[in-house]
Structure formats: structure tokens, C-alpha cells
Image: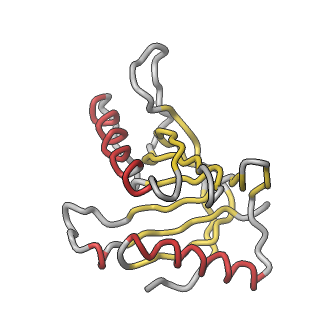
Amino acid sequence: MSTAPTFEQRAATNCAVISAEVTMASIADDLPPLIGRVAGFLAEHGRASSGPPFWRYRVIDMSGVLTVEVGFPVAETLDVPTGTPGDVVPGVLPAGTYATMVHVGHPDGLLDATSALLAWADGAGVVWDRTLGSDGEHWACRLEEYLSDPAEEPDLTKWRTRLAFKTAD
């Protein structure tokens, strides 16, 4: 089940991320552990997230490789001193208009929810902030924000995930 799509204005948001290259076959195994690594980095450096964890799809090639950032928003610019071990880096989610909807259900349903949001946008004449490259679609910001905390809601069929895709300016 998903909510009806809406538009939302968002300010630029600082974040802490780890970038990974995955395939559709490896995504479910490779990305979830990165949330814990970023959360651990923030805790180790005395920083708190200012919102839910997310996956930001940077480059999408559904039959090949996807480049995805896994991270958390943070209130202030993340300062990672040169030479700090690890792969967490600062980032920024860009300001702009986003088409959003919330998927309620098992994460396996996110592909269908994403397809529904893209189809709705096509019908509404929405233009995405993306470019096509030889390696796939390059998105300015295409997010899955994980609103449910698995420690508080262990039933995956009740998990809430917000899709937020940046539209062209």
C-alpha cells in the first residue's frame, strides 16, 4: 500500500554517507549493513542524525550496476579530518521540489511503489532532475527514506518507506 504522490519543497540537507556499487541481485545483502556503519561513525564522532536513514540512488542501471549512497541527514556539515580511517564522507541532499509518496509494507514492494511513482509522474508531465549516461540514469536525488525503526517495528509488512525524487528546476 502506498500514499498518493505529492510535491514537497526541501531545503539542502547535510548528510553522512557511504557510497557503494551494487546490482539488483546484491542490493538487499550489500546495502543494509552500511546503515549501521554510518550510524556507528556518527556515534563515534559525537554526532546525531537529524532524520531517518536513506538510500540515495545516484546512478541506476537496473540490468547492470547501481551507484547508491547509504546515509543519514545531519544538522551541520560533517567534518571528516583528512586521514580519518573509514569510508564515511560528507554529502548534501540538494534543495528543490521532490515528488514523494510513502510505501507501507515489506521492502520487497518498493520496486512496485517506485514504478507507481514514476508512472504517476509520467502521466502528470513531471520532469526529473536526471541525465542519461552510458552507464545509466544519473539522478540529482532519488531517495528511499526508511521511516520505520526495525527495533520498534519488527513486522516488515508495517514498515514505512518514503520515496522522494527530485524534479527538474
Q: Is residue 16 left or right of residue 93?
A: left
Q: Is residue 88 left or right of residue 136?
A: left
| Quadrant placement of the N terminus | bottom left
Q: Position of residue 112 (x, y in %)?
A: 53, 78
**Residue at image location 32% in from the left, 66% down from the top:** 148
Q: Nearer the viewer, residue 160 or 58?
A: 58
Q: Nearer the viewer, residue 64 or 166?
A: 64
**Residue at image location 28% in from the left, 73% down from the top:** 156
Q: Is residue 158 left or right of residue 26?
A: left
Does 136 sit above or below residue 82? Answer: below
**Residue at image location 44% in from the left, 43% down from the top:** 74
Q: How is the image coloured?
A: secondary structure
Q: Position of residue 152 (x, y in %)?
A: 20, 65
**Residue at image location 68% in from the left, 81% down from the top:** 119
Q: Which quadrant of the structure image shows residue 109?
A: bottom left
Residue situated furthest top in the rendering:
83
| Quadrant placement of the C terminus | bottom right
Q: Position of residue 66 (x, y in %)?
A: 59, 51
Q: Nearer the viewer, residue 139 or 59?
A: 59
